[in-house]
Amino acid sequence: MDEQIVSAVDGQAVKRVYTFNPVTACNMCGAPAANAEVLGLRLNQSQGQQPRGKRGIAVTICRCRNCCLVFTDPQPVPPSIADHYGIPPETYWQKTRLDPDPKYFTNQITTAKRLLNFTPGMRAIDVGVGLGKAVRAMQNAGFEVSGFEPSEPFHRKALQFLAMDDSKIKLGSVEDVEFDPGQADFVTFGAVLEHLYDPSAAIAKALRWLKPGGIIHAEVPNANHLISRIINGYYRAIGTSYVTNLSPMHMPFHLFEFTLDTFRRNGARQGYAVDEHTVDVCSIYNIPRPLHPLLRRIMERNKTGMQLTVWLRKAGD
């Protein structure tokens, strides 16, 4: 069924057409979706403190009982990627995030080099180049870098920032871009998998590009985020069935939240293992500031921060 949805982008009403596709199985572990736990409903806009008073279209948010992947069912799919990301980067990100940072991606590069036993000229692929900052950082660190970006405005901005042409940085999505099998040492999904309609297939494709023993890096929303649980508890306390998880029909268009077990079970199906992982608290939103220090300590101790980072090693020597 196709539905026309009105949502807000940069303060302006935007109409989008979605096809709502029922989910039959967990994308990452394959467990039947019918067995998943229903968490609640998510509106096509920011829900605020009183979502019951807002009008819009909501989809059901579920959690796989097998691997704890959080997903939307049905899945709202637009006709093209441009319906979500064909907007100026300044609209999607605040201007401060567009400025180059000399320390950007340095921690990730340090970990990748250690896990790869790095030698100069190793090949990296950046999935979702964005503005090109990670590409620049990897080039400066001695990697030979290729990549691609599905959003035309972002792709154009990245080519300008990198002073490169589209022979190395392609315009396209993970579904249609190809690289030679077994050519890469390192593939990075920085804040990408949660936006894809089939993250498991994207990982499978990256594995084909990797050499045996190569590394995939992914930064994703943590399904065990403490702040989400607190806000969901508030929504229940005021008598609603809404949840804060995901944002499938408004920015930043998140479709999935992940756990460590999500990747372990997917790795058993696809031939990779989780080498390392970290959980970062990141920023704290929608909670009174005096509570931030206490909540930050709890999240650091219990690994219930906002972002999960995983390092996945392809099977082989």
Image: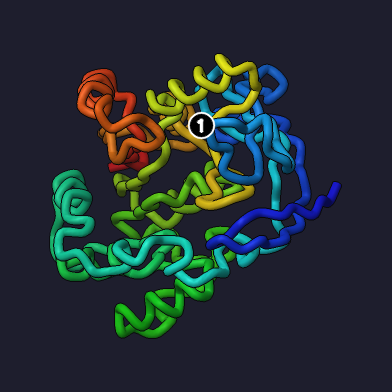
x, y (%) of residue 242? 62, 27
x, y (%) of residue 123? 28, 64
Q: Quadrant of residue 175?
A: bottom right
Q: Does residue 218 appear left or right of residue 256 in this picture?
A: left
Instruction: Tell me if residue 195 can be seen.
Output: yes
Q: Is residue 168 above or below residue 17?
A: below
Q: Is residue 261 above or below residue 100?
A: above
Provide the residue designation for mark 1: 269
Q: Is residue 180 above or below residue 35?
A: below
Q: Does residue 168 appear left or right of residue 45 in this picture?
A: left
Q: Is residue 23 above or below residue 155?
A: above
Q: Residue at left 41%, top 24%?
A: 224
x, y (%) of residue 223? 45, 28
Instruction: Tell me if residue 31 can be seen.
Output: no
Q: Residue at left 73%, top 43%?
A: 56
**Residue situated in front as seen by the camera: 28 or 105:** 105
**Residue farthest along the right direction in this orientation:** 1
Q: Quadrant of residue 103?
A: bottom left
Q: Residue at left 30%, top 40%?
A: 283
Q: Amino acid at mark 1?
A: Arg
* Quadrant into which the C terminus falls: top left
Q: Does residue 145 appear left or right of residue 119 in this picture?
A: right
Local SS, label 1: helix
Q: Residue at left 37%, top 52%?
A: 190
**Mark 1 crowdedness (10 Å alpha carbons): few <14, some 14-19, many ≥20:** some
x, y (%) of residue 38? 65, 20
